[in-house]
Structures are given as structure tokens and as C-alpha cells.
Amino acid sequence: NAGVTQTPKFQVLKTGQSMTLQCAQDMNHEYMSWYRQDPGMGLRLIHYSVGAGITDQGEVPNGYNVSRSTTEDFPLRLLSAAPSQTSVYFCASRGGPNTGELFFGEGSRLTVL
Amino acid sequence: AQSVTQPDIHITVSEGASLELRCNYSYGATPYLFWYVQSPGQGLQLLLKYFSGDTLVQGIKGFEAEFKRSQSSFNLRKPSVHWSDAAEYFCAVGSSMEYGNKLVFGAGTILRVKS
């Protein structure tokens, strides 16, 4: 059972560079989301998707883009990285309504110099 | 908008002692409440959840939590802590189970277990 798979696990970028964090799930979940985790702030929602072709903004969307072309994949793009985007990023998916439980990937640690 | 407060950043307990982690939420309607645990270098794992019904909820690994509407609290408890329980614990609140639910997390409580 692969569950939610994130790549890469670690990445170092220079300010202004772009990159994509990949997220894939094999549970046929319609709902997928991206969170960032910063010390003392818990997890904050960046973007989420309720199905292929549908995305929406969360609490901290600025500087990030997403797309959802398939049910399985939900990549997160940083078009011009900034030091403030240094964080640990988690992708999570959820089954149908009334389940509640989010299934998390193992995280991607990003450092922007 | 909903919010979650976990008043304790760090808690240290002795192995075998009881544990209570505090969680207070702010939300106007009936909340959907969760506790997640995160081991170092790992993603979050669901311990338990409350949607409705019995206010005392049992979870995995011997954890339980009690929903107290009058106190806006959802504290996590365990009668006897094991060294493997050392981790970070997050309380979260959601507004509904419909698609588009935006789960809001607290800042987390780091649990240290001393032998």
C-alpha cells in the first residue's frame, strides 16, 4: 500500500528558482490538499482540490500554483522561490464525505537560500 | 472562522504516567474534531475523531478524547504513557464533512517521555 507519495523528500533552492513538488495517491481519493508546516504554527492549508479539474485556495496560497489533471496527482509549483517558503510541505488526501480522515505523505523539506 | 489553541508547546511525562494534552477550539456550530500524531520525519497519522454522538471517543494506541461543548475543549488522554508515544500531537477542527472542508490545525504539542 503506497498511500500518498511525495517527491522529492529534500530540496535546496536559490531565491527566484522554480520547482514542482510532486504528490500522488493510489487510493482513488477525490480530495487532495497541500499544507506547509512551520515551527510553532502547526499546519496551514495552501491549496486543495475536490476532484480532477477543480482547485481552490486555502489559507496561505500566495506564491504557489496547483493543478489537478488526474485523480491521482496533485503537484505544487513554486514559480519564483522566496526564503519565506522554506518549510516542510505535506500532501494529504481524503476519501468521500463523512470520512474526515486525511492521509498524509511523509513530507518534503524545502530550503530556499 | 474556526481556530484551535493548544496551550502547551512541550510536555514531559514519565513512562507509565498518565497524560492529558489540551485542545481548545473556536467555532460557532458543531465542530468536527481530530487528533493527529506526527513521529519525527513522518507525516501525520489520525489518532481519533469526533463527529457526533458519544462525547468520549476512543482511538488507536490506547488514546481517548472527550468533547466538552461547554468548555470548547477536546482534550486527549492516555492512562499510561509508553516511550514510543514521544511525538508531536496536533488537534484539528473542521466545519463540515462536505467537500471543500478546510481542516484547521493547532500549533502542536511536543511530548517527551522520560524513563
Image (spheres, coloured by chain):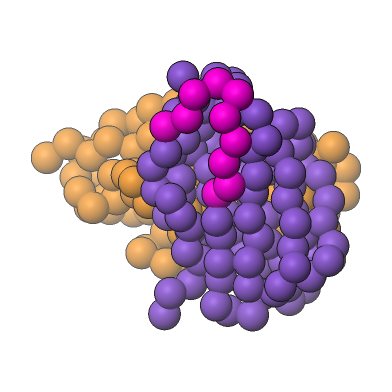
Chain colours: A purple, B orange
| Pick the front one: B63 or A91 | A91
> Which stretch appears magenta?
A12-21
Furthest-left residue in this view: B115
| Pick the front one: A92 or B26 | A92
**In which quadrant will I find the C terminus of chain B?**
top left
Q: Is residue B3 above or below residue A95?
A: above
| Pick the front one: A77 or B21 | A77
Residue at x-position 47% and y-position 64%: A5
Q: Position of residue A31 (x, y in %)?
A: 72, 66
Residue at x-position 64% and y-position 48%: A76
Q: Position of residue A27 (x, y in %)?
A: 58, 79
Furthest-front residue in this view: A17
Residue at x-position 64% and y-position 80%: A28
Q: Is residue A98 above or below residue A86?
A: below
Q: Which picture quadrant has residue A32?
A: bottom right
In the picture provided, is B22 more to the left or to the right than B71? left
| A68 in magenta | no
In the picture provided, is B63 more to the left or to the right than B67? left
**Residue A31 seen from this side:** yes
Q: Position of residue B82 (x, y in %)?
A: 22, 52
In the picture provided, is A100 more to the left or to the right than B109? right
**In which quadrant will I find the N terminus of chain B?**
top right
Q: Is residue B106 above or below residue A26?
A: above
Q: Which picture quadrant has residue A69?
A: bottom right
In the picture provided, is A68 more to the left or to the right than A25? right
Residue at x-position 57% and y-position 30%: A17
| Pick the front one: B64 or B42 | B42
**Residue B70 seen from this side:** no
Q: Position of residue A94 (x, y in %)?
A: 65, 68
| A13 in magenta | yes
